[in-house]
Amino acid sequence: MEVTSQPAAFEPQDFQTDLMGCCEDVSVCCCGLFCLPCLGCSIASDMNECCLCGLGMPIRSVYRTKYNIQGSMCNDFCVGYYCMPCAACQLKRDIEIRKRTGQF
């Protein structure tokens, strides 16, 4: 018998906030707007990664895979390339929500 898929710990879902949902957490939005590298380091720290890994497509893809969030690597690349501050803020908001609900 061949295993073709592994059971997911989480049901397929979307991010818990919209890409442009900056008003949902103004402090995260301000951090992303005025100090994007700081936000990237915070995200990387939350995910036990190197501070240099906190922004862009790779960390977003790893996070999506871990929590079974729908999307693709192509989408992760485009969102990270064309709208990195919004993508980083969305990821940080999702992390904070998961921390509050005990899913992180």
Image: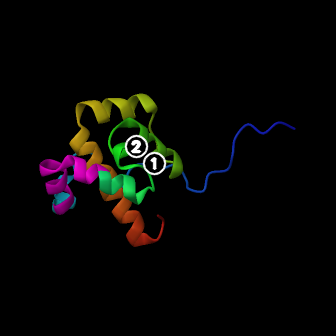
Whether residue 18 is visible:
no
Q: Secondary structure at mark 1?
A: helix
User: Which residue shows up at 82% across the image and 36% down it?
Assistant: 2
Q: Residues within 10 Å of mark 2 (few under 14, many from 20)?
A: many
Please state which amino acid type lies under the numbered disc 2: Arg
- Give the prevailing secondary structure in the magenta stretch: helix
Please determine whether, in this image, residue 46 is positioned above or below residue 56.
Answer: below
Does residue 72 appear to the left or right of 32 in the view shown? right
**Left or right for 11, reference 75:** right
Q: Residues within 10 Å of mark 1 (few under 14, many from 20)?
A: some
Q: Which residue corresponds to the image point at 87% horizontal and 38% vertical from the top-left?
A: 1
| Residue 41, percent from left and from top | 31, 52
Camera-nearest residue between 40 and 94: 40
- Tell me if residue 41 is in the magenta stretch: no
Residue at 31% from the left image edge and 57% from the top image edge: 42
* Vertical side of 101 occupied by 32: above or below: above
Q: Is residue 35 above or below residue 3?
A: below
**Height in image: 88 above or below 4?**
below
Give the Cα distance between marks 2 and 1. 5 Å
Residue to which mark 2 is pinned: 60
Whether the magenta-drawn stretch holds residue 28 is answered as yes
Q: Which disc number belongs to residue 63?
A: 1
The residue segment tinted magenta is 27-40
Q: In the depicted view, which residue is nearer to us: 37 or 102?
A: 37
Amino acid on which disc 1 is placed: Tyr
- Report which quarter residue 53 is drawn in: top left
**In which image quadrant can residue 92 be found?**
bottom left
In terms of depth relative to the viewer, which is nearer, 10 or 40? 40
Circle 2/circle 1 CB separation < 8 Å: yes
Q: Position of residue 79 (x, y in %)?
A: 30, 34
Q: Can residue 29 be seen here?
A: yes
